[in-house]
Every structure is written in structure tokens, then in C-alpha cells.
Amino acid sequence: MRDVTTAHPVQDLDVQPTPLALLLLGREADPKSERGVECPGDLPSPSDPDLVERARAAKEKLGDKVFVLGHHYQRDEVIQFADVTGDSFKLARDAAARPEAEYIVFCGVHFMAESADILTTDDQKVVLPDLAAGCSMADMATAEQVAECWDVLTDAGVAEQVVPVSYMNSSADIKAFTGRHGGTICTSSNAKRALEWAFEQREPSAGKVLFLPDQHLGRNTAVRDMGMTLEDCVLYNPHKPNGGLTAEELRNARMILWRGHCSVHGRFSVDSVNEVRERIPGVNVLVHPECKHEVVAAADYVGSTEYIIKALEAAPAGSKWAIGTELNLVRRLANRFAAEDKEIVFLDKTVCFCSTMNRIDLPHLVWALESLAEGNLVNRIDVDPETEKYAKLALERMLALP
């Protein structure tokens, strides 16, 4: 980095940077945060023409000792080296099904690697090529904030009626909180069944769900899939006293939604839907349930990443689709089905990758694989035993759902 000088003195405003500001500036590290930390090794240059061959050679040297997982939102340059691809929970289960693999290299984000560590054996080591590959949604609910929320529910006299349901896109700490309080985990594919299970745990007329951390998936599932009303849902804001809610509002609510969202899916709007319908007559609008409620209501189809892929596989030749999810996947699907004369476009007019998911690039993957091939364990994701115990309990409740 070049030096920058100025002829003018800078006024000292005596402003102390917050921990978050220091993290974003790269001056501090928080291994438990989805924002991660800087890479501790020397990365190969992105312009190195031998990167592909180096990755292939390191993977070949490791053989069956390594199992590479690639999330659907990863770059093509990384996906080509994945042994399996899928959404976060499918990949974690795939890792657990390969106990002979000493190293699980997870090309995804921090919470996904945590889930893989929870579900794999103690002898297996989960590696995240870039520790700064996090998830802004997962960071929107910290263990301290959720504990404070439970105190608010207790003071309002409703905690005993509440069952927590946490989305897979949450930290191990939040999954452990869910396990301790009798709750379960859900994916975007089984959110309805998880909510049905949660309400079955309490008296039908009194049961409530605390849904963490994505408000949109919780609201869309409750209203669109389960017949609740928007009035049945309240939004808990961890940055306001008592979550910004009165005790009466908490008592009347059926769904207590955490104020969190996906930065990618949250950008889609009804204007995006209207614009693409005008631009491409006859287009089918297919969006992820992490989108805002009004966008889901305006779409033709709604479903998880796996649902989106299967819907396009089954779509007739010549059909037209606008997809509201991460751009790497949309672009890959557009290329895949172009030969079948299926027109697939991104729902928004502006390009939007998941910035943290995209931190896993070829230089980071090469560095991680070559380090492992040389016997150096790097960037291990290791969930502590107490957290793992209760997070696994919540995950096992999900696995037991019919």
C-alpha cells in the first residue's frame, strides 16, 4: 500500500472506533465472528497461470485424505475442484458421510464450516480456505443479543410458550442456544415442517416461535405456507430496548421474527419483478424465500436453492425464467441450460454476488490445499465441545423431522 501524506493537519475528534469498525479495517480479529480474520499465509498471485494445475496437483497428492465441498454460490474457478456441490446443509451431511476423509475443505462460509465440524467425527478437520468468508445474516444475531432477547421474553411472561427455530444460516452459538431451549434448526426447504413441529411442542392456542435470524424466511413460511397473517408476526430488533416490542405485542404474537436478512436476497424488489415482466413477456419469476414478503408474493414460484435447480431442470425448452438468488448460481444455470433453449436471467438489473462467499477464490483454495499436502493444517474450524453438544442436539431434532 502506498503512503498517503497531506499538508494539512488532521483534527483529533477523539472518536474511538468500534470493534466492528476495527474488524472491517482489518486491525482486529474475531475468530468466532462470521466476518472472520485475515489469511495467515502467503497467497499465490491471482495472475499465476499455474493455479489450476497447482490445485489439481495438491488435491491429487492428498487423495482420499481430502474431501472438497462447494456451495452453489461459489465461483466457477472454485466449483470445478469440488467433490460435491449443494446447499449448506446438504454439504454438511455429505461431509459426515465421508468419515475416511481426514480433511474437509469447505468452500462456503463460516457457519457452514461450523455445521460440518459439528456433524463430522472428532478425527476429521474442517478447513475454510479464507476465514474472512462469513455471512452478514449470521452476524445479525449474536449469542449475547439472543440471550438478552430470552430475558425479554421471560419478563413478558411468554418464554415458556416459545420454541426457538433457527435457520441453518446461523452461528454455532445460535444453534446451541436453540438446542438448549428445546428448539430445532431448519433449512429453506423444510422451514414449514420445522415450524409445524415447533408449534406442536406447545398448547395449540398458546404456542409461539422465536425465528432466528432471517425475518423474511420466517415471515414467508408463516404467512405464505401456513396461513398465518402478517399481524401474527412481530419483529424483534436487538438494537432497541426490549426489542422495540411491548409485553402485550409479545403475548399476542405467534411468530417473533428476529430482525435479520440476507444482503443478497434482500436487494430484490417488486420493481425488479415488474421490470423483468415488461422486458421479457411470458417470463416465470422464481425467487428464494429469503426475499422480502412483497417480492415472494409477486413471484410465480418460490423455493430453496435446490428447488430452483430442480425447477429449471424440469422446465420445458423455450421457457423464460428470471431468478432471484445469488448471481454465481444464476449465471451457471443460464450456461447449463442454454443448449435446451431455456432463457435464464438474473432478476435484478444490477449485478450482485455474495461478497463474502466470493472471498473463497482460487488463490485461497490453492494455498489451503498445498498447505495440507505439505502437512500443515491451516484455517481449521473447530467448535468447542459444549457448543457442539447443544448445536448438534438442535440439528438432530431437524434430522428427525418426518
Image (tube, rainbow, N blue to C red):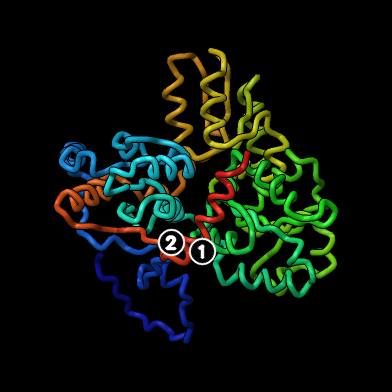
Q: Residue at x 69, y 58 (%)?
A: 163
Q: Residue at x 48, y 32 (%)?
A: 330
- Of the numbered discs in the image, which one, if any, rests on residue 155? none
Tell me where residue 280 sits by quadrant. top right
**Callout 1 secondary element:** helix
Q: Nearer the viewer, residue 308 or 383?
A: 383
Q: Marks 2 and 1, Cα distance to the nearest angstrom?
A: 15 Å
Q: Is residue 301 visible?
A: yes
**Callout 2 secondary element:** loop
Residue 394 in picture, x, y percent from top left: 56, 54
Circle 2: is it few (<14), some (14-19), or many (20+) Cα within 10 Å?
many
User: Where 365 sits versus 208, above or below?
Assistant: above
Which badge, 2 or 1, comes first in the chain's sequence?
A: 2
Q: Is residue 73 visible?
A: no
Q: Which residue is mark 1?
A: 173
The three-letter code of the residue at mark 2 reads Arg
Q: Which residue is mark 2?
A: 35
Residue 336 in picture, x, y percent from top left: 42, 23
Q: Residue at x 39, y 40 (%)?
A: 97
User: Where 98 sits versus 119, above or below?
Assistant: above
User: In this rendering, would 336 be left or right of 68?
Assistant: right
In this view, the mark in front (2 or 1): 1
